[in-house]
Amino acid sequence: MIATSITDLSDRARDVFRMVVESYLDAGQPVGSRTISRLTGINLSPASIRNVMQDLEEVGLLAAPHTSAGRIPTETGLRLFVDGMLQAADPSEEEQRAIERQLTGEGPIEEALAGASAVLSGLSACAGLVMVPRRETIIRQFSFAPLTDRQALAVLVGEDGSVENRIVDLAPGTRASMLAEAANFLTARLAGLTLSEAQANLTRELDSARHAIDAAARTLVESGIAAWTTDPLDRPVLIVRGQANLVDEQATADLDRVRQLLDELEEKSEIARLLDRARAGTSTRIFIGSENKLFSLSGSSIIAAPYRGPGGRVVGVVGVIGPTRLNYARVVPMVDFTAQTLTRLMQ
C-alpha cells in the first residue's frame, strides 16, 4: 500500500516522515534513526523511530539505499511532502535584492531574461532555466531562389532584419517566372503580418486574387507559407545557465545520473515542452523525477513558474533544474519571486 495523502499517516509517522525528508533535503545524505532522535520536537527512542521508518518504507514513502542503514525519501514521498507538508517562506531580503539587481529595466528584455536564469542558478546552486516568449516573425519580404529543377529555397525576411530559409519542393515544369510571381504575391499581400496571421489570411487572399495568379504560382504561395507553419512551436527558445552547479561533491558518487541530466539539458526542445506545461498554471509547478519520462533516468526535479506580459498573458516560464534532493522550501519561493519580478518588468 502507498499512502496517497498526509492524512493517511498517523501523527507519529507524519512527524518522523517530515524530519527524514527535511534532514535529507538539507544534507543530501540518508537519514538514520539516531539523527532523528537528536532533533527537537520528537519524543521517541531510536528504536521506535526505526520502527516508524520501516513502516514508512513499506508504504513506499522512504527507501533504504544498500550502502547505508539510513533512509531517503522516494519520489512518491517527495511528492507527498511537497504537496502536503512543504512550508515555504518568502525569499530572504538579500535574495530578493540579488534578483531585483539582476532584473533591472535597463537594456533589452533578453538581457533581463538571461539574467534571471543566471541569478537563479547562483542562488539555488542548480541550473537556471528561462523559456523566452515566443516572438513570431513579422513578414517584410518573401523570395524564392531555385536550387534544382525540383526544389527551391524559400527566403523570409522579417521586419527586424532577420532572415530565415526553408527548402520547398517544386512541381515539375516550375519556371523562374512562377517563383517570382509567387514571391511578389506573398510580399504584397502578407507583408506586415505575423506568420500565423498570414496563414489565417492566405485562403482569403488567394480567393480574392483568383484571376490574378495562376494555379502553379498559387501552389508555390501555399507551400511557401506552409514551410513555416509549425515553426513557433518547434523552436522554443530556452536559456540555461549554471550546468556546472549540477556536478557537486555529492553528485560525484553518481556520475552516470549527472551525465544523463547534462545530456537531457542538451535536448532543449524536450525541456521546453515540459516547461510549457507550467504556462497553463497560475502558480509555481514542481516536476519530480520519473513523474516525467524525460527525467526517468537522471532523477531530476524542475521548479517552474509562469511570467506574464502586457494584459496578464503568460509569455514564458522561469525555473531551476536540479537533483530531486534540492531545497524545495527555499527554491520554490525564489522561483516564484523571480517570475513576479519578470512580470512587473514586462508590463
Image (cartoon, rainbow, N blue to C red):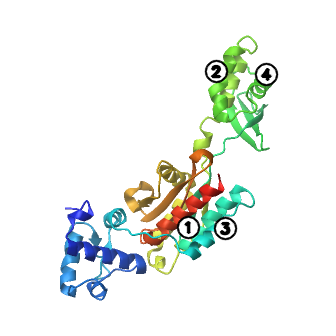
Task: Say what amino acid the circle numbered 3 marks.
Answer: Gln
Which residue is denoted by mark 3 in the rendering?
102
Q: Residue at x 73, y 34 (%)?
A: 154
- 4 or 3: mark nearer the eye: 3
The x, y position of residue 76, in whole percent, is: 31, 63
Label 2: which secondary element: helix
Please say if the residues under marks 3 and 2 sit with CB atoms less than 8 Å apart: no
Vertical position of residue 3 compared to residue 161: above or below: below
Q: Which residue is mark 4?
A: 181
Q: Amino acid at mark 2?
A: Thr
Left or right, 272 with respect to 204, comes to left
- In which quarter of the view is residue 298 placed? bottom left
Residue placed under numbered mark 1 in the picture: 127
Kind of residue sitting beneath label 4: Glu
Check disc 3 and report its element: helix, strand or loop.
helix
The answer to whether mark 2 and mark 1 are in CB contact below 8 A is: no
> Which amino acid type corresponds to the residue marked 1 in the rendered image?
Ala
